[in-house]
Structure formats: structure tokens, C-alpha cells
Image (cartoon, grey):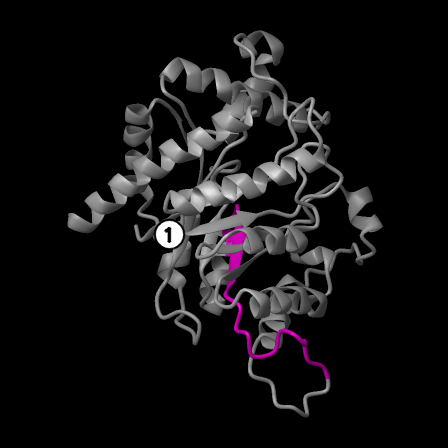
Amino acid sequence: MQHFSLLDLSPVPEGKTTADALTNTVALARVAENAGYHRYWLAEHHNMAGIASSATAVVIGHVAAATRTMRIGAGGIMLPNHAPLVVAEQFGTLATLYADRIDLGLGRAPGTDMATARALRRHVGPDDSFPQDVQELIGYFGDMPDGTVVRAIPGVGTHVPVWILGSSLYGAQLAAHLGLPYAFASHFAPAMLEEALSVYRATFRPSQTLSEPYAMVAVGVCAAETDAQAQFLRSSQVLAFARLVSGQPGKLPLPINDVDTQVPAPVLTQVRQALSCSATGSPATVNVQLSAIIDKYRPDELLVTGMIHDHTARVRSFEIAGDVLTQLLAHKKVA
């Protein structure tokens, strides 16, 4: 493993506002930079009361302005919602303002429901143009001649690093075919993680961008001073995910002690499986759990994420995770 990074969905806790969530994002990014995180990614979601990062490029610019050295990027931009040229101009502008610090992860899902996808004014149909759109977008970041009819300005010549995101074999195959880095969304969809990594690594074709495969694995983290405290704090994310899969999304709930009594057993089983690629507990417990994940999947980079209602507790969770991962990274390099 070469690096560890952080994915922030800018959660909006119950009793708080989107302004609070975005303020918390900037505060967390500053802490993450000091704690040694390599990247800080934000994700595009729409029409979700509990997530404040819908205008992802705008939030990335805000976070980049508040930090100095950490890479800032999208994990990711849902490309079906946008014209590739518009994304190229947005991220070309970011790369121009914050040279060599901007990443662009691309997802194939809309990141919302179909009614909202239609409201985004993009064509919703059976044709899958994602591979072509990815290649078109990458082209806009290249060194186009001055006479090229359509150029992204800013954008041309910025060579913004593009990642493929996924939770199935599709993204792994595409990233391997195009010779791009690959990030797997195992923090909420771990079922095909092992197979996707195997496919990506086995079929990777070197490109001008990347000479060998580079895989990032996303992991949920909820760390606190004790195992019991961490389990209590994690109940907020369990409740939020249960409500989401039950068709009742909302703001991030307050934590509770008796989550088993608040969520129907079949739903709770589904939620726990979806969130199973995770580490929850004290620093010692999180160390053991993250070490096991790293040993099993051998990621080039680990991307940690977590939804905790209390901002101070959430910051502390990522501080603990950063300390643990710094130790594990040093150990892996020595080994």
C-alpha cells in the first residue's frame, strides 16, 4: 500500500443545515491534511437531504482553497449527468487554479433517482455511452492543437488524472482496457470486490497515463476511544443506510443504542452486508481490522469514509484512522 485517503460525502446531520455540513467538510479536510491523508475526495449525489456535495466541483474548489498540499478530487462525478466538455472545463479550471492537486473520478450511475436524473436534463435511455464519454473527456485534457474545433478552455493541456469508479466488473474491465487507475466502492457494495480487483489486475493494459495497475479500495471507518463508543456512533450510518434502502432517505440520524429494534431484521441483514467492508472500534480494534483488509485485498491505496452525527467525534474518528494507517503504511514499507 502506497497511500491512504479520505472520502467525504458532506453529511447533513439531523438538526443541522447544509451550511453546517459544508463548514464541517472544510474543517475535516484541514485535519485530514495534517493527519497525512493523501487525497480528499467528494462525491456527486442529488436530491438527498443528507448529503451536501451535489455541486461537487464547487465544493472541491472550496476545499482546495482551504488546504495546501493534499490532493482534492471527485469520487466521483457521475458522468451520465453531464456533457464531457462541461466536466472538462470545470476540472480544467480547478487544475489551473490548484496545479497538480486535482483528481477526477468518474462513475457510471446517475447518483440519484430516475426522476431527478431527468431533471438534470441529460438523456436517459438504453444506450450506454459511458466508455466513449470517458475517452472524449480525457481527450479534452490532452495537448490539442490550436486549430482543434472544440477545446476545453481551461482544460486543454492540464492532463487531469482520471479514475474509473465502480462496484461491479464493468468498471474494472473498462479501467483495465483504458489503462486508468481504478477505485472500488466496497464501502457500500463489497460483494464483487475481490473478483473486480482480480479482473482489473489480470487484464490491465499499460497506457500513457499508467504503466501498471493501481487499485484503490474504499473502506468504512468508525473509530473512537472504545469499541462500545464506536459501535454507538456507527449506528447513525446503519440507520441512514437502512432508511435509504427502504426508500426513506433523510438527514443523518442521531446515534442510538438499540439499532436492532429500530430496523426490520431483513433490512438490517442487507445493511450489514453492504457495510461489511469496514473497521469499527477502538484504535487497537481498527488496527486489526484495517490490517486484515489490506492483507486480503492488497490495495495500492485505501480510501476511508464514515458518517458520524457529531462533527467532533467524526473528526476524531478520522484522526484515529490516520494514526493507524500511518503505522500500517510504515510497517508495510519496512516489510
Which element carries disc 1, helix, strand or loop?
helix
Position of residue 272 measured from the top left corner of the image (x, y, whole percent): 50, 24
Instruction: Please tell me which residue is depicted at 53% across the width and 49% down the height of the picture.
Output: 41
Magenta residue span = 150-171
Q: Is any part of residue 277 visible from this angle? A: no
Up the image or down, 55 lies above or below 206; here it is: above
Specify whether residue 254 is painted magenta: no
- 215 sits to left or right of 329: right
* Residue 213: percent from left, percent from top: 37, 61
Residue drawn 40% across and 63% down? Answer: 203
Residue 158 in the image, given as x and y percentages of width and height: 55, 74
Q: Which of 190 and 331 is in front in this view?
A: 331
At x 51%, y 60%, the residue is 163
Which residue in the protein does label 1 denote? 198
Residue at screen point 40% across, 64% down: 204
Image-quadrant location for residue 95: bottom right
* Amino acid marked by disc 1: Ser
**Extreme bottom residue here?**
147
Q: Nearer the viewer, residue 199 or 292?
A: 292
Q: Is residue 156 magenta?
A: yes
